[in-house]
Amino acid sequence: MESSAVTLEKNKKLPRSSSLWRQIARRFLQNKMSLIGLAFLIFIILFSFIGPFFSPYVNLGVDPTNINQSPSAQHWLGTDKLGRDVLTRLMLAGRISLLVGLGAMVMSVVIGGVLGIISGFYRGIVDQIIMRIADVLMTLPGLPLLFIMAAILSEWKVPTEYRIYIVMLMLSIVGWPGLARLVRSQILSLSERQFMQATEALGLRDTRKLFKHLLPNIIPLLIVSGTLSVGGAILSESTLSFFGLGVVPPDASWGNMITSANSLLDFQKRPWLWVPPGLAIFLTVISINLLGDGLRDAIDPNMRRR
Amino acid sequence: MTNEAPLIEVKNLKKYFGEKGGLFQRNVSVVKAVDDVSFQIHRGETFGLVGESGSGKSTIGKSILRLQSITEGEVLFDGKDVHKLSNAEMRNLRPKIQFIFQDPYSSLNPRIRVGDAIGEALLDHGLCEKHEVASKVKEVLEICGLSEYHMNRYPHEFSGGQRQRIGIARAIILQPEFIVADEPVSALDVSIQAQIINLFSKLQRDRNITFLFISHDLSVVEHLCSRIGVLYLGTMMELGSREQLYSNPLHPYTKALLSAVPIPDPTLKRERIILKGDIPNPANPPSGCKFHTRCPFATERCKVEVPEFKEVESGRFVACHLV
Ligand SMILES: Nc1ncnc2c1ncn2[C@@H]1O[C@H](COP(=O)(O)OP(=O)(O)O)[C@@H](O)[C@H]1O
Ligand code: SF4
Ligand SMILES: [Mg+2]
């Protein structure tokens, strides 16, 4: 959007009005809650991706001599039943949970965005087919659907290193229909606007109508709903992994870390096993929602009322 | 009047809305937004189309430029039926026929800088080299009373009048032969209207553009148009030159419209006709002469018989039993 079709060298001196994005940034910075959310997310990202470099236990893995230790100076969050350092595992699990959430979001946004745009722009039979599929996927309750898909995939014995991509894909299958509907309705309402009729009167190509006129107008929507969907994806991934249907050991995710505390004894006597991953999920999801809400309010103060 | 073939020929144009009466919706009400309208626009002239809101003016304008489909009839541009062109032919024709929208606020994309909005069609149609676009944009901006200075700004930074200038610049940069201007001043402050009207006069003088100028305001049309058509509920009531219409309106509806226009010279007197009632529902227009429910001269015949749109003198048409 920055490259202006009509920029000559001599025009560099011309006043470029502050872009809409700068105004959005200004409004965003005034929102305390979403700044708190953003700060926590930055913390959790650094914690997960940089943290392990400072941990002496990353390559140690299983240590049978050191199982189920309570928190101490060596193991700040104790060790699990295989003697692994819980803090280190929490960081490594964070990498996977965040990546799965982000990956699922990107896939949902790409699939939902593209299909929504096609539906809204070309209408007709394509629109009908896409929207019927989306309807069906949306009518089926999300979690059971995920369980069924995951169960089928478990039957197929997918190698664990591909598991997280499969989980992303499953989550995006559940995630795209909502986005596609949103994008489609946005495209439909934009098409009613006079500036879209103007593109018709100017005889612009479809590609220009789509990429220069429609897309920039739905990017805010994609950013906001994309951000919010990361939280949902992390939550779903955790649930799946908790039940052993998502990310499976030896890969760690916050969800399957909670599983490892699945006996009553662990639950009552060894809270360091399940409280940290539980808190990590809870705080991350809340932060993402705060951030998403803040972005929404900053981008379009009217969106909330609609 | 020249003998040259007209640039635009509208023949028996009909546009009905909401007629997709399927099996279960046979009583869907049909709005005959444009009901059998015919007229011609000659090269270089400005044809005025007046009528109250809802009379079908915009629909005619959009039908001529094929911004919407039509129900029946023909629109010839330079002898070619616009609605029968292939998509590729239509795209090639687009730069030659332009539309200026009524609402300058919604006709510009809020996320596109003004310079790009004006220049993009040139690029998209390959009408000039990329490095020439900026100078062409500058040129039309200046013609339209803006400056190079405004190129990198967004629409929301402009006033209504300035935005309408941008809309005009966007149309004329393509050097069109024909422009439909759909009530281009009615959304603007009265003080701004005169400036935009002057811009249109300037374009008429300096560029050989044929205009269809749509307005509900007869005094605006008087300024700019050499021939004028008066529309009522989708039907043409009277058509003639400006002089014919303003000095001697023949149709009762034209008389009523004109009597509502204030006359600058108070010594001149016009017969004052106050219209009774409101515009009828277009989905259920009156029988016979569509104007009979409000016409002070209506007779029994008017309720049953549709008056013919007949030529009463050279180039002048009226649809009224009394004429
Ligand atoms: N897209 C549409 N769908 C249904 N009815 C329409 C549509 N566009 C216009 N109409 C109807 O057609 C009639 C003429 O509208 P329009 O051409 O916009 O009138 P004007 O421009 O003279 O105000 C009105 O009764 C209007 O309600
Ligand atoms: S035909 Fe009758 S109703 Fe219609 S304008 Fe003439 S006099 Fe009036
Ligand atoms: Mg109109």
Image (spheres, coloured by chain):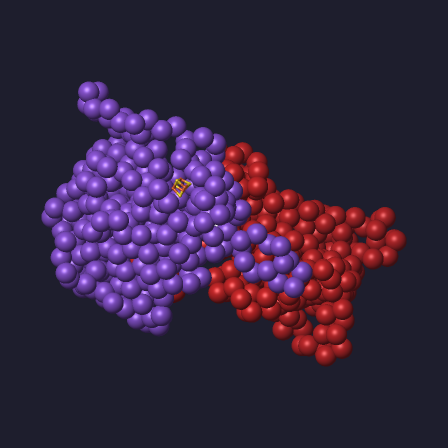
**Percent of width and height locating residue A273:** 76, 53
Position of residue A211 in the picture relative to residue A45 (left or right)? left
Chain letter, purple in picture: B
> Chain A rendered in what hue?
red
Q: Is residue B217 above or below residue A75?
A: above
Q: Is residue B136 above or below residue B193?
A: below
User: Image point 65% across, 64% down: which residue?
Assistant: B23
**Percent of width and height locating residue B165:** 25, 42
Q: Is residue B91 above or below residue B279?
A: below
When asked about the image quadrant of residue A168, the answer is bottom right
Q: Where, quadrant-wise, is the C terminus of chain A in this rendering?
A: top right
Camera sees residue A174: no
Camera sees residue B13: yes
Position of residue B286 in the picture relative to residue B263 (left or right)? right
Please state which of residues A101 and A71 is positioned toward the viewer in this rendering. Answer: A101
Position of residue B135 in the picture relative to residue A132 (left or right)? left
Please state which of residues A136 and A107 is positioned toward the viewer in this rendering. Answer: A136
**Percent of width and height locating residue A296:** 53, 43
User: Image point 13% across, 51% down: which residue?
Assistant: B207
